[in-house]
Amino acid sequence: MSGVAIAQAIPVLCSPILSRLFTPDDFGLYANFMAFVAFPVVFISGRYEYAILLPKRDEEAINVLSLSCILAIFFTLIFCFVSLGFGNSIAGLLNANQLGSYMWLIPICALFAVIYSIFNEWCIRKKWFVTLGKNKISNTSGIAGTSILFGLAKLQPGLILGEILGRIFSVTTAITRVLRKDKHLFAYVTLNKMKYFARRYFNIPKFTIPGQFLNTFGGQLPVLVLSSQFGLYEAGLFMMSDKVLGTPITFLGNSFSDVFKQRAVQDYQTFGNCINIFKKTTFSVIKIALIPFIVLFITAPYFFEFVFGSEWYVAGIYTRYLCVMYMIIFINTPTCWMTVIAEKQHLMLIWQVFYVVLTVIPLYVGVMLSDIKITLLLFCIGRSIAYLIQFFISYKLAKGDSKIIKIL
């Protein structure tokens, strides 16, 4: 089993332990916290870590790494000061009063998440894939392990503290592994070089951050709405359901995606389309997904009660609402790279607008009706439509159909 697979498996295997140490309310608070963390992660480094792969020489790339780290630390300090002074006011304004005492921890957690990502990009540049796998295992095992320890000690907020201390552990190990091999390269870091690369790769934050912000907003909005309008308990149940469905789907979907991308790029460059591999991949994913999703739909409440404890029975009911949506996401995941393969990234930005709109409207209607089940049902319908739109765009691009570009 690869390091990435082990890293993905650790949180899932630890979930039955954590679900008995922490209540749905605890998970709701944690979900709310992580939803807020996701926003500064998008921009505190300027996303310059994406440029670490681009310079020809390591002596140049190390300046991009240093630039990313310095920007992340600088913006984190600003957010920390703002959070310490106005944390409770900000939490109240965002209808997240339960996070008031922990607002200052949000930028700190975001910083360690970004630093971890930066040093992983360096590992990718150097093709240290074994080291990358070790970093991922350190990250997930550190977070899960410290969370379990806090749960056993009955310290609150255990999941939040476990997340932060786990990330500190994983960042420390990631930095240590890089310094052990490439410490000498930091002698080539200068202020002028960092300024030069900040200008040279300015298009990365300019064009990446807006799209990622939209994606993050749409992705985190359900947790924020559920916790603020229906309470932490409901948000915690939703998080557990989302985690159980999302983790394996992400891993399996990415595995199919890696195979699809390689063949699709070759076909598209040679023939101007890649419809054959598109159809083959899609039908393969459908055959794999159909039976497990049907079984899960039927058994979800009993599965959750047995695996996670009696408190989580309702999360299984919510899983039934999410099943169809996640099956569509799973089918769509391998082929959603068509906008990149066809070099039509602007279509992805257009789709992200649809994604946000089709998330906001159903949640708004559900909240107006003051019914959690209707809210989840409408959310799943809206999100499913969004991913079907993305699938339609990918299908048209795979066919080499230029009409879709004119339409959008």
Image (cartoon, helix red, strand yellow):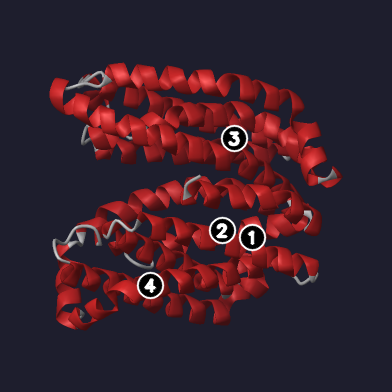
Where disc 2 sits, the SS reads: helix
Does residue 242 lie above or below 33 as drawn?
above
Residue, x 41% and y 75% (percent of image)?
A: 176
Q: Disc 2 or 4, which lies upstream in sequence?
A: 4
Question: Alpha-carbon neighbours of circle 3 within 10 Å: few (<14), some, or many (≥20)?
Answer: many
Label 3, label 1: how far apart the Cα atoms are: 29 Å
Label 2, label 4: how far apart the Cα atoms are: 22 Å
Q: Residue 46's image quarter?
A: bottom left
Q: Disc 3 or 2, which lies upstream in sequence?
A: 2
Tell me the quadrant of the picture where the C terminus can be found: top left
Q: Amino acid at mark 2?
A: Thr
Label 3, label 2: how far apart the Cα atoms are: 29 Å
Image mark for residue 84: none
Q: Position of residue 27 (x, y in %)?
A: 71, 56
Where disc 4 sits, the SS reads: helix
The front one of 211 and 194 is 194
The reply, left or right, for residue 240 in relation to residue 75 is: right
Question: Alpha-carbon neighbours of circle 1 within 10 Å: few (<14), some, or many (≥20)?
Answer: many
Give the residue number, with chain letter if any, for mark 1. 144
Give the residue number, with chain letter if any, for mark 2. 140
Disc 2 + disc 1, Cβ < 8 Å: yes
- Which of discs 4 and 3 lies nearer the camera? The answer is 4
Image mark for residue 72: 4
- Which of discs 3 and 2 lies nearer the camera? The answer is 2
Q: Amino acid at mark 1?
A: Ala
Q: Amino acid at mark 4?
A: Ala
- Which of discs 3 and 1 lies nearer the camera? The answer is 1
Give the residue number, with chain letter if any, for mark 3. 379
Label 2, label 1: how far apart the Cα atoms are: 6 Å
